[in-house]
Image (cartoon, helix red, strand yellow):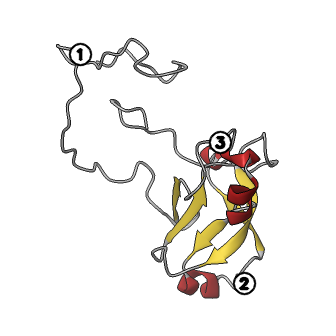
Amino acid sequence: KSPNTQSSKRLYTNLRFHTPDGRARFGAYHSRGLAEPPDPDYPFVLTTGRLYGHWHTLTRTGRIEKTRQMHPEPFIEIHPRDAARLEITDNQLVEVRSRRSKTFFPAKITKAIAPGTVFVPMHWGALWADNAEANALTHPESCPDSLQ
């Protein structure tokens, strides 16, 4: 069992992994599926992630004008087919709701995201925008080893 917990401020500060010799091991993990599959009330899979140029919660890159101009505000990506079905237009402010929270993001319509899936970058939080925290929307399930 990992000595690191969700309540730890930082993981692996003792420079040891939870293996007998303390060294990291790479392994292949098989997906257990979605912790919360889509259903009629919540029909999309929400993914979160990083954007090129930004790091974590903008505490460093949010102060750099060039990176701020690349992505000046949070947004939600949605596939054109899903956007058309829901009558969402590009840059329209849309409500994004999960079982845990709700917020509003401008829509970015793109074929870069699969139908049935939406993407919200994880960088914005209470420091930068009201109600823009992607993690407030997500399911708390995480990998027991990486806690991600």
Q: Which residue is mark 2?
A: 89
User: Which comes sooner in the sequence, label 2 or label 3?
Assistant: 3
Residue 144 visible at all: yes
Secondary element at image label 1: loop
Q: Up-down: is 131 above or below 25?
A: below
Please indicate whether residue 47 sits to the left or right of residue 108 in the image: left
User: Which comes sooner in the sequence, label 1 or label 2?
Assistant: 1
Q: How many residues crowd mark 1 within 10 Å: few (<14), some (14–19), many (20+)? A: few
Q: Which residue is mark 3?
A: 57
Please identify, in this view, whether the residue under mark 1 or under mark 2 is nearer the observer.
Answer: 1
Q: Which residue is mark 1?
A: 22
- What's under tag 2, amino acid-wise? Thr
Per the model, the C-alpha gap separating discs 2 and 3 is 28 Å
Secondary element at image label 3: loop
The location of residue 12, given as percent across then percent down, is 40, 19
The location of residue 117, given as percent across then percent down, is 49, 68
